[in-house]
Amino acid sequence: MNTVRTVKVGGDYHYTIAIGADLLADGARLAHMLRGRHALVVSDGNIAPLYADRVEAALRAARPDLVLQRFVIPPGEQEKTLARFGECLEALASLGATRDATVLALGGGVVGDLAGFAAACWMRGIDCVQLPTSLLAMVDSSVGGKTAVDLPAGKNLVGAFHPPRAVIADTSTLRTLPDRELRAGLAEVVKYGAIFDAHFLHWIEGHAEALLARDEAALAHAIALSCEYKADVVARDPFEHGDRAMLNFGHTFGHAIESEQGYAGTTGEGLNHGEAVAVGMVLAARLATALGMAPTEDADRLQALLQRLGLPTAIPVGLAPESLLARMRLDKKADARGLRFVLWTGAGKACITSGVDEGAVLRVLTHG
Ligand code: ADP
Ligand code: ZN
């Protein structure tokens, strides 16, 4: 029996997230999302050989009149460039894509961001259906409409808000996801429990082994709940003017680590995004404790859970606290009142705070 869970993203830009096994073979479901005759499947060199044939065959069976093409980039964050974005637009041109064409983003966050941005720009915006294949993309980047490419000057500097027409998360694809990527995705799952739902956090503690063992039911539950929380925030604040910033828990520290190490995580040498966020959440929890806002036991508990999930919880050696602090001052989230943090106030709760004392931040960066 195939259970398909659906999560609705409400508000002005509403769409549905479907979560379940073997959804990429469900041609009727995929075809239902296409308004016109043209579709471009965008994927990367790891994922396309595994899943693109399946998607295309299912679509062709359901819609024999479809004009379908594939655009594949090499895997890795270093490919999220303006050059690849240009190639993706060229692929849409050679497909003869009209205003009712659809981009199908089949892959992790890199593919989703790049393909989503191309869809946002082609003829001023066409439909993008997100088909996330990494856990991180399923619980985070495929939902909410943030699309972007990187510049040498920094990550995600050029992009657009372009909500997807639908998100279809086939949990069967997680079987081939590398272990390290699975754990990185679990960091973002823990984030939702940590800031929104103490009960969910407790559930993750009880299912850590099942999640690591890729138990389908456990993963589907974790994905669905994470998406519900993300959908809720995104519907209220689609353009991140307020509440949506809560999702940046652990990210001020995490982004500083990522940029200070030069996004080495993308080449496998440093921390990847989920790992940097794991460290960042522990630091944010420690900062809240230092400011008297959260109990020490809760921060200890968060750290222990992340460790059980095989995630790092300390700043990698070689990254200087002062340099990390300097990175944070440059962060998009810093504003005129100084450093802005999502501070943890204990299991299931968090708040956004501006003007955090830099001395306290430096102490946490130095001593953890
Ligand atoms: P993320 O999804 O973490 O934001 P990427 O898009 O770079 O980042 O995906 C992480 C890595 O995992 C990439 O090398 C990608 O090709 C690979 N990948 C993603 N999904 C799968 C999958 N289902 N099976 C195998 N490899 C995958
Ligand atoms: Zn993140």
Image (cartoon, rainbow, N blue to C red):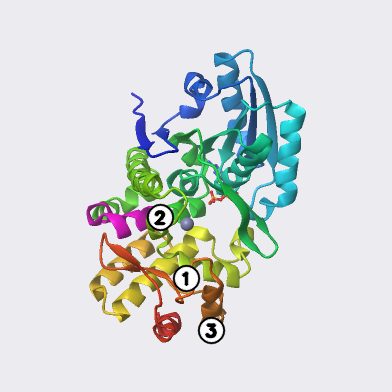
Query: Would you say residue 317 is visible in this rendering?
Result: no
Considering only vertical position in the picture, is 19 above or below 139? above
Q: Residue furthest top?
A: 64
Q: Amino acid at mark 2?
A: Arg
Circle 1 residue: 253
Q: Which mark is residue 362?
A: none
Circle 3 residue: 322
User: Which comes before the other along the chain, label 2 or label 1?
Assistant: 2
Query: What residue is shown at x 63% (from left), y 68% (from top)?
Result: 262
Considering only vertical position in the picture, is 34 above or below 137? above
Closer to the camera in the image, 210 or 11? 11
Q: Amino acid at mark 3?
A: Glu
Measuring from the top left, give residue 112's x and y in whole percent.
57, 43
User: Which comes before the other along the chain, label 1 or label 3?
Assistant: 1
Q: Is residue 244 left or right of residue 110?
A: left
Measuring from the top left, give residue 10's x and y in whole percent.
37, 38
- Front tag of 3 and 2: 2
Query: What kind of secondary structure does the magenta stretch mostly adopt?
Result: helix
Q: Is residue 279 left or right of residue 162?
A: left
Circle 2 residue: 244
Question: At numbered mark 2, what does the secondary structure look like: helix, strand or loop?
Answer: helix
Query: What residue is shown at x 70% (from left), y 63% (from top)?
Result: 152
